[in-house]
Amino acid sequence: MFLKPVLAAAALAVAATSAAADPSFWKFEWPNTDFEKTSVENWVEILSGGPPKDGIPAIDAPNFIAAAEETRIGDREPVITLEIEGAVPRAYPIRYLTWHEIVNDEVGDIPVAVTFCPLCNSGITFDRRVEGQILSFGVSGKLRNSDMVMYDRETESWWQQAIGEGIVGEMTGVELVALPTWMESWAEFKARNPDGAVMDEPGWPRPYGQNPYTNYDSSRKPFLYNGEMPPHGIPALARVVRVGDRAWPVERLRETPEVTEAGVTLTWAAGQASALDSRNIADGRDVGTIRVRDAAGNDLPHDVMFAFAFHAFWPEGEWMLAN
């Protein structure tokens, strides 16, 4: 179950839905956001997730330690891996991102935002350079289709995490560039990058390593989501691999661990724990590691997200089902 504070916050959010359908409801909290400029057609889609603005604190300029020195992370625990040529490979543990959702970092000469939305299982890394400026991101406390709404501190525009696009304010319609990162087990990262670095534990009082959304990815219905369910009989919280506007069900890849279609090759390998299953992330059931590469073997930007979220944001997207 969800933790009691999350449930209480959800009840308040649902109660406030009718008021929240008008953006004037939020202007006292967001006086610097231009609500006149937006791509949101139906404001009722945006709900409070419970915490207020920055109630989930993003991490800025995180500290790192050598992978060989890390002893707290279980081998099966998921991390988001960022490998940029000329820079030491970095791992961002989901045990921290679960509680912070955004990490503003700089790798080599690239300012990045590493993001994870637990409610959609969406983990995407973005380049923070936009129209000649470097943005830094925080957590708005709002959800749309159960997906995190981020905001940038420079213009206080709102951004949809799953699609990497501005949806409210000055940056409406601007798209962030996604970088080719992936989620894998800590053991996989260490084996490939013995001299790599891992984000150190933040100095916040959080039960890192615990999952506040116990058994969430076994639920029948997403949290604070009122949209359509996925087609083809696919469960709402089944994982799919999104590449552009196409989605491959992970269950298909379990049966056929290497698939080459539409110009990309997807592979699945066992060994990574779900971050949204058991109370202790390290004990989560095996959901496997996905890699997505082009014909030359280069890693491609992608997302392993829940099926309902893909359908919500790509309603005309293509489902890559087994023949």
Image: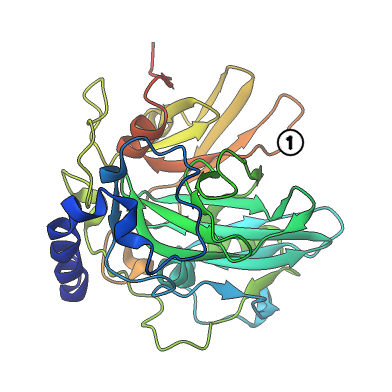
Q: Number of numbered discs present?
A: 1
Residue located 25% across and 28% down the image: 234
Q: Is residue 1 visible?
A: no
Left or right: where 158 falls relative to 84:
left
Residue 258 in the image, given as x and y percentages of width and height:
53, 28
In the rendered view, would you say 297 is above or below 233? below
- Per the image, the residue denoted by label 1 is 298
- Image quadrant occupied by the N terminus: bottom left
Measured from the top left, where is residue 266 in percent x and y?
A: 56, 31
**Mark 1 neighbour class, 10 Å CA radius: few under 14, some 14 to 19, many 20 or more:** few
Residue 243 in sight here: yes
> Going by the image, does 321 lie left or right of 233?
right
- Horizontal side of 182 relative to 127 (left or right) equals left
Q: How is the image coloured?
A: rainbow
Q: Position of residue 235 (x, y in %)?
A: 23, 34
Is 266 positioned to the left or the right of 31 in the image?
right
Q: Amino acid at mark 1?
A: Asn
Callout 1 secondary element? loop
Which is more toward the observer, 14 or 61? 14
| Rendering coords of residue 180 (x, y %) | 66, 44
Q: Residue at x 79, y 65 (%)?
A: 88
Q: Quadrant of residue 156?
A: bottom right
